[in-house]
């Protein structure tokens, strides 16, 4: 496998388009260039399980980013159902607590087994990249962002999750503390010169790879590019070069 192939297995495109038909058209424009598609709450609410099935039929792996956060029984059932769709990655909120995280991991494994498909990785969201220290203080969290992220990451690992979602800015703290195969997925990735948007803790693809990220999520810089495939390829090349340097 070439370094470009490895990069392709690690780059996730955020298919954040509300209309399912437009989303599928966008995905088709990246067929053969990317492997992973992220389906989040707005698109899934409109397109549901049939959209996930269509993406898989097109040859994509699906990251179902619904960030489940509820009582343990409900999250266990949701993860069981999501795993039955054949997705490869899914998210829950680490702040839901140990019993909820354990239920998520159990439900995902059970759902995949029942459906006869590989078990997905359950990724626990630590602190959203749209939040900073002042936002945490508003909801009563007195820890610094970095301390909160690390505490939630260790809880997720202890609870049987397959990885976490965290800002790339915390990679230097997290990667030494969390041995692989426990994975780290990083949103908030912006190529040099791209707009930051509503995310406050961002970095470049190359820096995220060098920092130890396992998957990178990129949306707007690809989605809004005149040539989406070319924009995605440029990011893949940056990732491959960074891996060679690491």
Image (cartoon, helix red, strand yellow):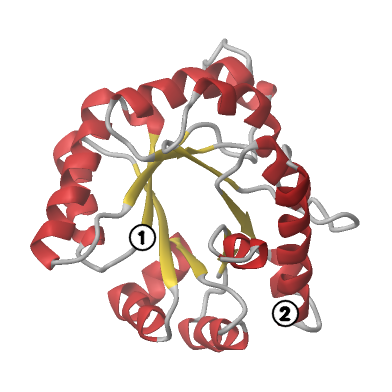
Q: Quadrant of the C terminus?
A: top right
Q: Which residue is mark 2?
A: 228
Please identify the quarter of the rendering in which residue 128 is found. Answer: top right
Question: Which of pointers 2 and 1 indicates the residue nearer the eye?
Answer: 1
Q: CA distance from mark 2 to mark 1?
A: 23 Å
Above-or-below relation of 22 to 126: below
Disc tally is 2
Above-or-below relation of 10 to 52: above
Q: Which residue is mark 1?
A: 88
Relative to the observer, which residue lies in front, 131 or 151?
A: 151
Q: Quadrant of the N terminus?
A: bottom right
Please identify the quarter of the rendering in which residue 236 is found. Answer: bottom right
Relative to the observer, which residue lies in front, 38 or 88?
A: 88
Numbered circle sitting on residue 176:
none
Relative to 43, is 128 on the left or the right? right
**Helix, strand or loop at disc 2?**
helix
Query: Residue 145: x percent and y percent?
Result: 62, 21
């Amino acid at each position: 496998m070439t370094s470009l192939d490895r990069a392709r297995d690690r780059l996730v495109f955020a298919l954040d388009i509300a209309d399912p038909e437009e989303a599928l058209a966008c995905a088709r424009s990246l067929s053969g260039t990317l492997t992973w598609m992220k389906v989040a709450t707005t698109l899934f609410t409109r397109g549901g399980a049939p959209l996930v099935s269509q993406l898989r039929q097109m040859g994509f792996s699906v990251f179902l980013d619904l960030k489940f956060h509820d009582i343990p029984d409900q999250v266990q059932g949701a993860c069981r159902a999501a795993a039955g769709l054949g997705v490869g990655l899914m998210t829950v909120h680490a702040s839901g607590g140990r019993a909820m995280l354990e239920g998520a991991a159990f439900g995902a494994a059970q759902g995949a087994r029942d459906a006869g498909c590989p078990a997905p990785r359950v990724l626990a969201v630590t602190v959203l990249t749209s939040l900073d220290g002042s936002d945490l203080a508003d909801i009563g969290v007195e820890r610094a962002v970095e301390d909160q992220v690390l505490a939630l990451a260790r809880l997720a690992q202890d609870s049987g999750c397959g990885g976490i979602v965290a800002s790339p800015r915390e990679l230097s703290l997290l990667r030494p503390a969390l041995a692989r195969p426990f994975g780290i997925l990083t949103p908030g990735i912006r190529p040099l010169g791209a707009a930051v948007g509503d995310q406050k803790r961002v970095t470049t693809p190359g820096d995220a790879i060098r920092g130890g990220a396992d998957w990178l999520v990129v949306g707007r810089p690809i989605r809004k590019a005149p040539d989406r495939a070319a924009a995605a390829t440029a990011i893949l090349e940056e990732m491959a070069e960074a891996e060679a340097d690491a």
